[in-house]
Image (cartoon, coloured by chain):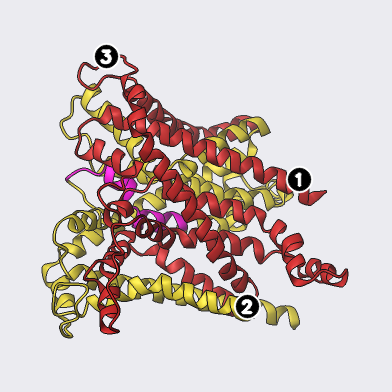
Chain colours: A red, B yellow
Amino acid sequence: MKKNKSLLLSGPYIAWMVIFTLIPLCVVLFYALTDVDTGAFSFGNIENLVLYLPAFWRSILYSVVSALICLVIGYPVAYYMAHCRPTAQRFLYMLVMLPMCMSFLLRTLAWVGLLQDTGIINNFLEMLGLPRLSLIRTPGAVILGMVYNYLPYMILPLYAIIVKIDNRLIEAAEDLGCNSIQVFARVVLPLSMPGILSGVTMVFVPAVSTFYISNKLGSTDIVLIGDIIERQFKQGDNANMGAALSLLLMVLVFVCTGIMNRFGSDEEGGVLV
Amino acid sequence: MKKANRIITLLIFVFLYAPMAVLIIASFNVGKDITQFEGFTFQQYAEVFRDRSLLTLLGNSLIISVLASGIATAFGTVAAVGIQGLNPRMRRTVMSLTNIPMTNPDIVTGISLSLLFVFVGSKLLGQRDSLTFWTLLIAHITFNLPYVILNVMPKLKQMDRSLVEAAMDLGCTPLQSFFKVTLPEIMPGVLSGAIMAFTMSLDDFVISYFVTGLDFITLPVEIYNYTKKQLQPKIYAMFTMLFLLILVLMVIMNLLQLRQDKAKNGHRRG
């Protein structure tokens, strides 16, 4: 009786998620395995994926670098936040959240204004009598855009974990003769591992699939996989090739998050022992 | 060490806010170029209210996000109660299903839904424009649902099961016990799920971009269309106003929380 009621309550939700998440993925698979002109079954799109491997590698490289930079600069911020007074913590949390609520398109566009050859930074340099730099349309600009857009996704989970670390553990380590570097390496860092893993995932996934950032801040030869997929659907009219690319992107992300989760559970086990 | 962290934190906040400062300054600019400040004016703000097209788009965004997050919250909360009662294996399966839209990149979610809608619409139903307001709404509900479920489930798990049983023993019907006992108990989770869903919906560009039709366009999608052409400076004025609105809302929420905490602490001390 009780079991039937649970099924009755969750049934519509399960049906909804099957219809609007699982079946659409099957449709993607269907399109990926269909020829664009004839509509017949074909492995052509899958075979053609090889052509786009350079873009895939570039996307992975840029987003891994971005995630690592976010981790390195986000960690001190999260650590500082977690050790503020509670009122200050809440205020800083709000300040990290706020950019996430604002249009990322416009914020990225602001970077174009800052970085372009006649942009704000270069105008400033000229005012100081320094030579202009070519900043935009470089790999660095794309990575900067990714770091800028997704940094809050790193800081917030890190903060959530660090703030929960029991201070007595740190004191105990100090009492037992650890210096501050050892305390960090042996106590704080291992305990913040779950936050690091979820932060890295939350930066990596949107970064690897972005299409706007590279479009605005990168040069025409810095094409990421997201750009290609967007073009296949919105301009190129080859939805079937786009579907094959999306499928590969999805597999890539699932493999990466799977590895991360694997890491995560191992770490947790380690901490427990 | 602490000092170094403070300096890094300060620099990071400058980094996070500098581009927004550029946009806000641009909203008062006489000229159209974001890089050259030619003089101070409120003209762009007047333009937003005179021309109204941006306000209509913002209205569209609000309609979609209020509807989608509202439906997802009601639907998701009921579903979470059901999922909680399923056997562990079934529950795990349903939770992996819930995690699919969370792990999938937005672009894949958007494309898969758009392909489904086009496939069903044009091939099965023979429609010409298969992407409409309704497909946009369905897409938003779909990516909002996991946020509700993932916020409500932990609260349900924490809840003392005997409370519900006690209510039933005292003569409540299952429906009454849900509204009088379960719902108040899980309310914080329901609320944070709803807020998260709402903000995700309001600001969503990627998924909307792929599933939106021509009949109903939201603000982020139109901003994207603008940034491909010449950007109209009134967008900066819109940005500034939204920035202030969200800032004020967040400060108010913080102050309320602060007062609540103080009341709680005072109570405990007294």
Residue A222, given in percent of the width and then of the height, sits at 31, 48
Whether labels 1 and 3 share one chain: yes
For mark 3, name the chain.
Answer: A
Q: Which mark is residue A269?
A: 1
Image quadrant occupied by the N terminus of chain A: top right
Is A248 above or below relative to B204?
Answer: above
The residue carrying mark 2 is A84
What segment carries the magenta color? B196-214
Q: Which picture quadrant has residue B23?
A: bottom left
Is A230 above or below relative to A37?
Answer: below
Q: Residue at x 64, y 38 (%)?
A: B85
For mark 2, name the chain.
Answer: A
Q: Residue at x 22, y 74 (%)?
A: B35
Q: Residue at x 66, y 67 (%)?
A: A163
Alpha-carbon distance for marks 1 and 3? 50 Å
> Callout 1: helix, strand or loop?
helix
**Label 3 neighbour load within 10 Å: few <14, some 14-19, many 20+:** few
Is B40 above or below relative to B55?
Answer: below
**Badge 2 amino acid:** Cys
